Image: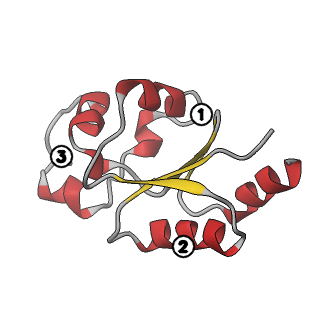
Amino acid sequence: MALNIQIFGTKKCKESAKAERYFKERRIPYHYRNLAEKGISKGELDSICAVYSLEDLMDTEGGQYKKRNLTYIRHDREYELLNDPLLFRTPIVRNGRKVTVGYQPDVWKSWIEEN
């Protein structure tokens, strides 16, 4: 089965740039989605949540979380993530049903070796 790599990130995120470079250097085609331009759909979020919890996906240390003052406000994580994609921890890398959050080259290497 061929790799079907999707990278969700932002152009300002160094970790997203490192993920993009990882696949580019290995000549592995990927689709990059800039979360600053287009968010994640409910179906995509549900697929990612099969592996990670909403708590794992929300970047509570990031500038957007602090800017929106979500530390002190009770909020629905799913609603917030779907409506403000800059709250995601990035990069989110998908290969079919497999998903990673953050820079995880060891996991990506195992995906490549499985092919």
Q: Is residue 48 above or below residue 46?
A: below
Instruction: Work out which quarter of the rendered image holds the N terminus and state it.
Output: top right
Which residue is pictured at 43% across the width and 24% down the height? 43
Which residue is pictured at 57% across the width and 73% down the height? 21
Answer with mark 3 or mark 1, whichever residue precedes in sequence. Answer: 1
- To which residue does mark 3 refer? 70
Which residue is pictured at 32% across the width and 71% down the height? 12
Image coordinates of residue 4 in percent, x first then y, are 65, 44
Answer with mark 2 or mark 3, whichever residue precedes in sequence. Answer: 2
Q: Crowding near pointer 2: few (<14 within 10 Å), some, many (20+)?
A: some
Q: Crowding near pointer 1: few (<14 within 10 Å), some, many (20+)?
A: some
Q: Do the residues labelled 3 and 1 touch (CB within 8 Å)?
A: no
Three-letter code, disc 3: Leu
- To which residue does mark 1 refer? 51
Image coordinates of residue 91 in percent, x first then y, are 48, 57
Q: What element carries label 2?
A: helix
Image coordinates of residue 95 in percent, x first then y, are 65, 43
Q: Crowding near pointer 3: few (<14 within 10 Å), some, many (20+)?
A: some
Q: How far apart are marks 2 and 3 (CA)?
A: 28 Å
Q: Is mark 1 on a helix, strand or loop?
A: loop
Q: In this view, does 12 lie above or below 70?
A: below
Three-letter code, disc 1: Val
- To which residue does mark 2 refer? 18
Q: How far apart are marks 3 and 1 (CA)?
A: 24 Å
